[in-house]
Image: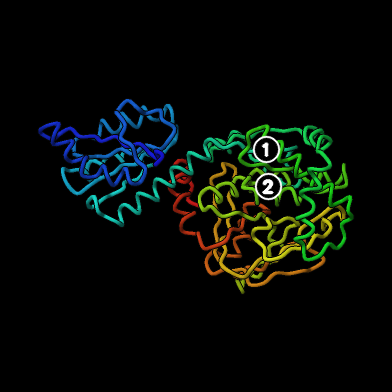
Amino acid sequence: MDTRFGYIPIAVTLESESETESLIERYAPALEQLGGARWPADALDEPVPLLLVILTGGTEQEALRLWANREASAPGEPLSLLAHPGNNSLPAAMEVLAWLQQGGASGRILYLAGPDDREGLGRLEIAVRDLEVRTALQGARIGLVGEPSGWLVASTPDPAVLHGTWGPEVVSIALDELYGALQAVRVETAASLLRPLVSGAAEVREPSPTELEDVVRVYVALRGLVQQHRLDAISLRCFDLVSELATTGCFAVAQLNDDGTIAGCEGDLVSTTGMLWAYKLLEEVPWMANPVQLNPAAGTLWLAHCTVPRCLVSRYWLRSHFESGLGVGLAGELPRGPVTLLRIGGKAMNQLWLAEGDVVRSGSAENLCRTQAEVQLTRGEVGDLLHAPLGNHLVCVRGHHMDRLRAWWKAMIAPRHRCDC
């Protein structure tokens, strides 16, 4: 098994080194089963998360020394402390965590009642996964192709703020680079991708053969930029394609998400980051959409967009782009079932809105973007979108994950930024 985390045992009050080893050997098999590897105390610059195993009392100063040294290679990583029932392990861990929290730093105590504590080991598994996601986001690269669209007045964070709060680096890519890549797309490459797109559709309504070929070429060009710039995600100022080239990025964005490369519309870095977070944590492909209608009394809202990953829909139609009537938009039918909605945002990128519910029907209104779904909320408040919105796009993922998302956010984002939202 690949190493998922390192652990360093700390003890100062046991009578002998053999007694210390005997104690850690009780827990080592369980830790190693989860992908843990024992590190020496000076191995603090490894790229995987670190766990400090508090074997005894009196270890507070050593734990804080290791945490301070770890900050050099993993700044902001929450300190994970593993405590057990004996040798004053738990009170020592509590003292360390209290000191951290007094200074605004974050951490958590993971308590094992014994080596066979299944519930405790389950919590440890979740904590390791949380840290892995944080590490992945810290190393992620989001390509911004063009500038954010002008109407995103609340969704244009300073890249330094986004990096400081969530971790990803923003890689700026000029639209001219995309246009150049478009010119280099081979006809046969586009044709091989176009055939399954058309044959899989329930209907091709407005788009012409040329328009269909053009949107596939946009996808091939964007895929090349992802590879060239080593991107984990990409956000495209897509309306410039409409105005300058009479084509759309709707299929390209949808297909990149289907491929496992998170892609957002309109240069919206906020929503693209939210999509990347949800994908990494939940392993669910996200859908970015506009909340276009809502009913606070009934707890319902309609989501709509001209793009949707085809893996999320039961069938799809190839339509024109709603706002322009040009290019290709995807009209997909989302199956009924549980979903979670999320939105991150705020000036410091440290705020979060979450809701859970169910897709109850799909729509086909001609005055909305092509893919339309009504969601009946079971948790969360529709009215928040009227009173305290974080922006005009929401991220939708399959399944009910509100508690999982909020727990991660509280552990990784909220303490460091002291946000009560």
- The answer to whether residue 105 is visible is no
The residue pinned by badge 2 equals 256
Q: CA distance from mark 2 to mark 1?
A: 9 Å
**What numbered label is drawn on residue 37?**
none
Residue at 84% x, 48% y is 213
Q: Secondary structure at mark 2?
A: helix
The mark tally for this picture is 2
User: Tag 2: residue type?
Assistant: Leu
Residue at 15% x, 43% y is 87
Would residue 89 appear left or right of 180 to someone viewing this image? left
The residue pinned by badge 1 equals 226
Would residue 159 appear left or right of 110 to someone viewing this image? right
Asked whether the residues under the numbered discs 2 and 1 touch, taking CB atoms below 8 Å apart as contact, a structural biologist would say: yes
Who is closer to the viewer here, 337 or 100? 337
Residue 36, compared with residue 318, is above or below; it is: above
Q: Tell me residue 331's x, y (percent).
A: 76, 62
User: Tag 1: residue type?
Assistant: Val
| Quadrant of the image occupied by residue 72 | top left
Q: Badge 2: how crowded within 10 Å, few (<14), some, or many (20+)?
A: many
Considering the image in quadrants, where does the N terminus appear?
Answer: top left
